[in-house]
Image (spheres, grey):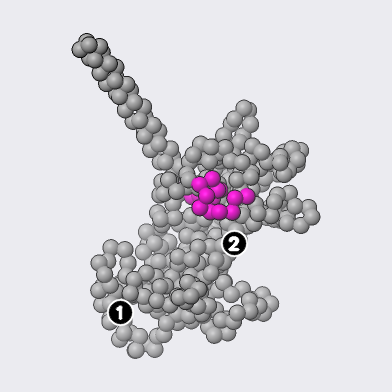
């Protein structure tokens, strides 16, 4: 781990000895340093190794209703019991996990839970959520429950909370039992209308799919830098001997890092991104089949079709997270084998498809277009022949 940390520090250095423009090193760092804000009671663009919120139905779907596995969200995880989930879990609390979730509603253990009452996909209006909340009102009064928010001592504007205290980690920084948003759209009711963000006391969680522990973040940085070192024009910024040296160092480390699906160097996604051109491996966007220039990473406008974005092979919307037995912890869509650099226009077209699905569809489209052109050419030939006969 130390060798990898030292190597990353050299490449991501922003001082006198910097290898890459600061815009590029910031882009790499921001990959793990600025999570999205779509989660219930989401934090404002914080690091990936933070306190997470995981909907109960996703945990069930991904076979993660296991306290041993859930505790490997090292910075804390909150299982979100949405609408009927609380009563369903309470009725079936004969297993360890269900019992733990009920007993730790609003708790500060590594794994705790909250109730969310909200309209969900598939609901027509908010009638179901409203009916759920009426049922909860009795529980709220009986158990003296109150809404989820940060503890008052962690609502300061000042980011310094004392040595060793990280506001985005641990379930001891917030309290409460439930969150209610029935009028449509998670977090909308409590957003500051001027700033269009949540007040600080409600900025608590990152989404489960944005989570990656600190070790995984380093693995992600390693593979994303390894890709960048294969830009066809990387030598604009790093001398050729240094590029070769860095590639060898990263290759050695990637060969030593194993997950359940093998070492990172053998990840199936690498050959899709690093393709042989004139005897050299070149960084390509597998979605557009275009070479990626190192200068494309300098484009700051995220809406520019030629800008470079972090893309997912397995889409976030598929709600897939895993317990990796080899590493002994949870991995999500933010994992090194699932991320790659892509051109914005390709990322927009990819939507929920994997690289293979996207490429297959485009091969079929090209084939259909070719067949259509052949048919049009045949019709034009017949039409020309008919016109000549009529003449």
Q: Residue 301 colored magenta?
A: yes
* Other residues around mark 1 within 10 Å, as few (<14) / some (14–19) / many (≥20): many
| Above/below status of 88 relative to 302 | below
- Disc number lying in front (2 or 1): 2
Residue 374 seen? yes
Q: Is residue 369 left or right of residue 167?
A: left
Q: In this view, does 227 lie to the left or right of 211?
A: right
Q: Residue 351 colored magenta?
A: no
Q: Earlier in the sequence, mark 2 or mark 1?
A: 2
| Above/below status of 67 relative to 335 | below
Q: Is residue 123 left or right of residue 247?
A: left
Residue 189 rendering spot, x and y as whole percentages: 39, 76
Residue placed most toward the observer, 73 or 173:
173
What element does badge 2 sit on? helix
The residue that mark 2 highlights is: 33
Residue 233 rendering spot, x and y as whole percentages: 66, 38
The residue that mark 1 highlights is: 133
Characterize the magenta stretch by its predominant secondary structure: loop
Residue placed most toward the observer, 369 or 355:
369
What element does badge 1 sit on? helix
Residue placed most toward the observer, 105 or 140:
140
Q: Which residue lies furthest to the front in this view?
A: 391
Q: Is residue 46 left or right of residue 41?
A: right
Task: Place residue 148 in its image quadrant.
Answer: bottom left
Distance Cα–Cα, label 2 vs label 1: 36 Å
Q: Magenta stretch?
A: 298-313
Residue 245 seen? no
Residue 138 rendering spot, x and y as whole percentages: 30, 86
Q: Where's the N terminus, which quadrant?
A: bottom right
Residue 68 rendering spot, x and y as whole percentages: 49, 65
Contact between marks 2 and 1 (CB within 8 A): the answer is no
**Who's the residue at 27% across and 66% down the image?**
123
């Amino acid at each position: 781990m130390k060798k990898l940390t030292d190597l990353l520090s050299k490449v991501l250095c922003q001082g006198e000895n910097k290898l890459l423009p600061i815009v590029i090193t910031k882009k790499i760092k921001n990959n793990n340093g600025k999570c999205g804000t779509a989660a219930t009671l989401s934090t404002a663009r914080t690091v990936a190794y933070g306190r997470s919120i995981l909907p109960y139905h996703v945990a069930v779907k991904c076979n993660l209703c296991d306290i041993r596995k859930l505790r490997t969200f090292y910075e804390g995880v909150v299982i979100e019991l949405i609408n009927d989930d609380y009563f369903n879990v309470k009725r079936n609390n004969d297993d360890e996990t269900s019992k733990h979730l009920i007993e730790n509603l609003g708790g500060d253990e590594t794994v705790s839970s909250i109730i969310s009452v909200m309209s969900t996909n598939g609901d027509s209006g908010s009638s179901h959520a409203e009916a759920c909340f009426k049922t909860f009102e009795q529980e709220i009064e009986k158990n003296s429950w109150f809404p989820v928010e940060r503890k008052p001592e962690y609502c300061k504007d000042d980011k310094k909370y004392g040595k060793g205290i990280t506001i985005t980690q641990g379930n001891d920084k917030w309290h409460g039992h439930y969150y209610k948003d029935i009028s449509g759209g998670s977090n909308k009711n409590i957003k500051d209308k001027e700033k269009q963000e949540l007040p600080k006391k409600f900025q608590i969680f990152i989404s489960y799919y944005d989570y990656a522990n600190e070790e995984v973040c380093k693995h992600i940085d390693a593979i994303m830098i390894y890709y960048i070192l294969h830009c066809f024009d990387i030598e604009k910024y790093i001398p050729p001997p240094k590029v070769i040296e860095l590639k060898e160092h990263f290759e050695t480390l990637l060969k030593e890092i194993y997950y359940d699906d093998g070492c990172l160097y053998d990840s199936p996604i690498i050959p899709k991104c690093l393709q042989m051109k004139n005897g050299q491996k070149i960084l390509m966007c597998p979605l557009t089949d275009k070479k990626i220039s190192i200068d494309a990473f300098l484009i700051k406008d995220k809406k520019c079709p030629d800008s470079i974005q972090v893309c997912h092979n397995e889409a976030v919307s598929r709600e897939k997270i895993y317990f990796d037995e080899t590493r002994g912890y949870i991995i999500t869509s933010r994992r090194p084998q699932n991320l790659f650099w892509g051109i914005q226009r390709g990322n927009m077209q990819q939507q929920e498809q994997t690289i293979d699905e996207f490429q297959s569809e485009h091969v079929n489209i090209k084939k259909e277009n070719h067949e259509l052109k052949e048919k049009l050419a045949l019709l034009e030939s017949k039409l020309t022949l008919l016109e000549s006969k009529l003449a």
